[in-house]
Image (cartoon, rainbow, N blue to C red):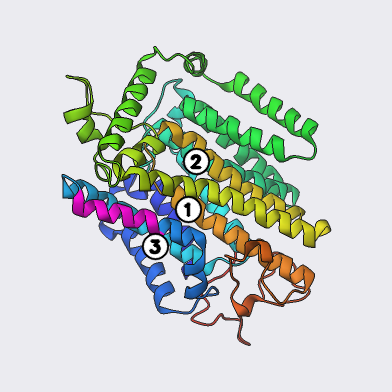
């Protein structure tokens, strides 16, 4: 129930079926499904103990972020604005907690990757004019995906997950499917004509090139992707890319003004910021030029700095760079212990690191702090490290946690399972084949 509920959450939250079939809104599935899986996780047993889940650094990072948002409800000028942001993200925090507690198997994590890839493919299929009109198109799915720039950011986060699925499938049909999905996602980013989305895609490509042991082949794949872009991109895409460094262009000027205002907001309110969800209002009333329209921060960094102060920006940077460093640390330790068996682990950790890089790069041009991305990426990074450490313990027959990642602890039931290959799901089952606490987790 819980695992399939998680997959349903991604479909409901990203695609928003009620945007296409309004009658579905009466069922309140977007609220009901997350509530059920969270309740089941809180009330039942889970593969990861609560103590271990709380000890994870991502739990502390996400907890700090939600605490800062809650504090702004008490201190902001307009309580309703801050409260609305708190309500918007509390569901994402709960889903983060469910993933933290429940996902301990590579096939479960691959199922989440598949869900995140497929929801973007479905959204693209439901918006064919994005590919055919040659114009920037409104996306009907989701409050955080309505703008082409927002959609491009979300797709960029899914691209590394799709690449992982492609490189780790053995069946030809599945490889063809995920290869086609990867091309579709790249083309979708191009079709949005998003400059920030393109820069995020470049950042992901450079990361993979830097990590690759076969840089020539990786560069060739990148050139092929560029060739596809040049062959299929609308003319408007090239016009926008031509202006990417033009600071005199209208939207660039708007961003520069917003970023400058964000710095002034932080200087005036360094400890608490102006309040969650307050940037556009404070900009229009106090910090923007006279007569200028109200606008958003156009950057996760300036948004969180202005709205949640210095503690907010430090928490965001802690989440981004802390996760990247922890992935690298875990990978180095695993390679030292199991050089021959670390290829899949390296690919898994690289995919989640690339997803975080996509968020960090693309988010530099979007007000995406309260979108689900940071919560979901942090969750899959926690799960990927746990799976990698578990695999290393099985390979080495260890009885103790991996020293280089001592902040990550493993449930005793998951330790010392010799000959259990990465991807098998024999843990925590009774004779009847069900897990303790209801057996909710079933891999796809």
Crowd tier of the residue under label 3, counting other residues whose Cα lies within 10 Å: few below 14, some 14–19, many 20 or above: some
Where residue 35 sits: x, y (%)? 35, 66
Q: Is residue 200 left or right of residue 399?
A: left
Q: Residue 128 location in percent, x, y?
A: 46, 32
Q: Nearer the viewer, residue 399 or 84?
A: 399
Q: Give the residue displayed 38% in from the left and 63% down from the top.
A: 34
Q: Secondary structure at mark 1?
A: helix
* Secondary structure predominantly adopted by residues drawn in magenta: helix
Expressed as whole percent of the image width and height from the top left, the position of residue 109 reads: 59, 59
Residue identified by numbered label 1: 376
User: Which quadrant would residue 103 be assigned to in this image?
Assistant: bottom right
Q: In the rendered view, tell whether residue 240 sits above or below residue 351.
A: above
Q: Tell me, yes or no, if residue 315 can be seen here.
A: yes
Seen as rendered, the residue at the extreme right is 340
* Start-end of magenta stretch: 63-75
Q: Nearer the viewer, residue 37 or 397?
A: 397
Q: Which mark is residue 22?
A: none
Residue extending farthest to the bottom is 431
- In the image, taking residue 333 as reference, residue 439 lies left or right, namely left
Residue 118 seen: no
- Discs 2, 3 touching: Cβ within 8 Å: no
Q: Residues within 10 Å of mark 2 (few under 14, many from 20)?
A: many
- Residue denoted by label 2: 359
Residue at (53%, 42%) from the top-left corner?
157
How crowded pointer 1 is (Cα within 10 Å; few <14, some 14-19, many 20+) is rated as many
Which type of secondary structure does the marked residue at label 2 adopt?
helix
The question of residue 301 being in magenta is answered with no
Q: Residue at 39% across / 59% down in the picture?
A: 63
* Residue under numbered circle 3: 94
Image spot of residue 193 (x, y percent): 47, 24
- CA–CA distance in space, label 1 to label 2: 11 Å
Q: CA distance from mark 3 to mark 1?
A: 10 Å
């Amino acid at each position: 129930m819980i695992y399939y509920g998680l997959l349903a959450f991604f479909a409901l939250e990203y695609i928003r079926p009620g945007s296409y079939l309004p009658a579905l809104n009466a069922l309140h599935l977007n609220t009901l499904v997350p509530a059920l899986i969270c309740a089941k996780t809180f009330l039942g047993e889970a593969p990861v103990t609560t103590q271990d889940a709380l000890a994870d650094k991502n739990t502390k990072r996400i907890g700090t972020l939600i605490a800062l948002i809650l504090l702004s409800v008490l201190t902001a000028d307009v309580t309703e604005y801050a409260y609305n942001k708190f309500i918007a993200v509390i569901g994402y925090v709960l889903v983060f907690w469910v993933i933290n507690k429940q996902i301990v198997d590579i096939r479960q994590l691959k199922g989440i990757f598949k869900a995140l890839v497929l929801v973007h493919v479905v959204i693209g299929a439901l918006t064919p004019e994005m590919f055919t009109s040659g114009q920037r198109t409104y996306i009907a799915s989701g409050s955080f995906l309505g703008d082409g720039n927002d959609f491009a950011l979300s797709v960029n986060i899914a691209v590394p997950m799709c690449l992982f699925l492609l490189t780790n499938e053995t069946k030809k049909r599945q490889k063809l499917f995920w290869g086609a999905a990867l091309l579709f996602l790249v083309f979708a980013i191009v079709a949005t004509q998003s400059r920030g989305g393109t820069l995020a895609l470049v950042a992901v490509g450079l990361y993979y090139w830097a990590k690759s042991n076969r840089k020539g082949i990786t560069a060739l794949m990148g050139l092929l992707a560029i060739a596809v872009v040049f062959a299929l991109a609308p003319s408007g895409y090239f016009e926008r890319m031509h202006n990417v460094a033009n600071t005199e262009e209208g939207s660039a000027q708007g961003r520069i003004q917003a970023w400058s205002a964000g710095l002034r907001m932080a200087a005036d309110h360094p400890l608490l910021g102006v309040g969650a969800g307050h940037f556009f209002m404070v900009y229009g009333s106090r910090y923007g030029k006279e007569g200028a329209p109200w606008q958003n921060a156009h950057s996760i960094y300036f948004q969180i700095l202005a709205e949640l102060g210095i503690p907010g920006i430090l928490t965001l940077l802690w989440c981004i760079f802390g996760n990247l460093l922890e992935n690298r640390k875990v990978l180095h330790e695993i390679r030292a212990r199991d050089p021959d068996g670390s290829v899949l682990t390296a690919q898994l950790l690289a995919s989640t690191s690339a997803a975080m890089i996509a968020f960090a790069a693309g988010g530099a041009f979007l007000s995406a702090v309260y979108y689900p991305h940071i919560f979901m990426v942090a969750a899959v990074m926690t799960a990927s490290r746990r799976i990698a450490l578990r695999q290393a313990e099985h390979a080495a027959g260890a009885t103790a946690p991996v020293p280089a990642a001592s902040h990550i602890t493993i449930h005793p039931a998951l330790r010392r399972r010799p000959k259990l290959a990465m991807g098998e799901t024999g843990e925590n089952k009774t004779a009847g084949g069900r897990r303790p606490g209801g057996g909710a987790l079933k891999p796809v």
